[in-house]
Amino acid sequence: MRDVVENERIATGTDESKTDTLVDDLLRIADLNVWPLKILNHSLSRIIIEEKPYVSADLEFVVANRKLNMVTVEDKHIKNIYSPSGFGETQIAANIIACGDENIRATDDEEPIDETIFAMRVLSTYVTFYKAEISASYWAELRRGLPKTEVIVKRWPGANAKRKGLDLVEPNGRKAVLDALANIREFLLRHEQHWPHQC
């Protein structure tokens, strides 16, 4: 964490590898790499519409069981993120959809399924969690084009800015992040089923 804080002070040549290491450490401390869960690095996921690849996403970290995923999509240097993208939330939404769409294609019959996908954004030492519950009807509509069905992605904590979220530098922030990861781990284990592969 010290490396991430020191790296934040650098004006040029920002290095996201320090944040990558912090994210990897957090996931492993929370036992999100212990079977039946696994961590996938740089997993390629796509959104397919009308049988054509529409968007590809290189997901830096994915924690998967066999049906549900926690996608850790954004771990950015704080100076590489800006307000027009919602501080990375646009990419988070696209990555959640790409991961879920990839999950469906990994099933034997490729039929739409209800999915719960979690995401975690790490901007320097500030952590925000997201949860999307996406219905099978949304996936069925997406196959044909722009869905009319709405998906709501919940954010915790609620504020969205560069230095909002749970701060890992603060003991209470660290505890809240580790508690949230433990809760997500328990959720994933409760819903573990025999599915072939996840994004």
Image: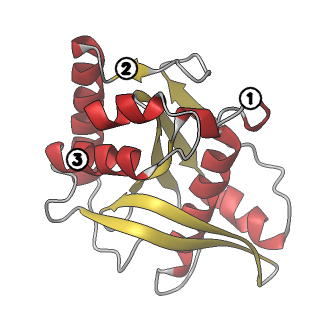
Residue under label 2: 167
Of the 4 image quadrants, the one containing the N terminus is top left
Image quarter of residue 33: bottom left
Q: Amino acid at mark 1?
A: Ser
Q: Is residue 199 visible?
A: no
Which residue is tagged 1?
Answer: 83
Q: Secondary structure at mark 1?
A: helix
Cα distance, mark 1 to mark 3?
A: 28 Å
Question: Which residue is pictured at 46% across the width and 87% down the height?
Answer: 108
Sequence-wise, the earlier of marks 1 and 2 is: 1
Nearer-the-camera pick, 106 or 158: 158
Asked if the residue under mark 2 is in contact with the one under mark 1, i.e. CB atoms within 8 Å, the reply is: no
Seen from the viewer's position, the closer of residues 97 and 169 is 169
24 on left or right of 56: left
At horizontal 55% and vertical 80% (from top left) the residue drawn is: 105
Q: Is residue 46 above or below residue 122?
A: below
**First in sequence: mark 1 vs mark 3:** 3
Q: Amino acid at mark 3?
A: Asp
Q: Place residue 66 in its image quadrant.
A: bottom left
Q: Residue at x 25, y 23 (%)?
A: 174
Q: On screen, 113 above or below 171?
A: below
How far across and down, in percent of the image, does residue 147 sit?
A: 81, 56
Amino acid beneath label 2: Asp
Helix, strand or loop at disc 3? helix
Element at label 2: strand
- Residue at image point 56% right, 81% down: 110
Between residues 168 and 108, which one lies in front from this camera angle? 168
Corner quadrant of residue 177: top left
The label on residue 111 is none
In three-dimensional space, the C-alpha distance between marks 1 and 2, rounded to whole angstroms, equals 19 Å
Residue, disc 3: 25
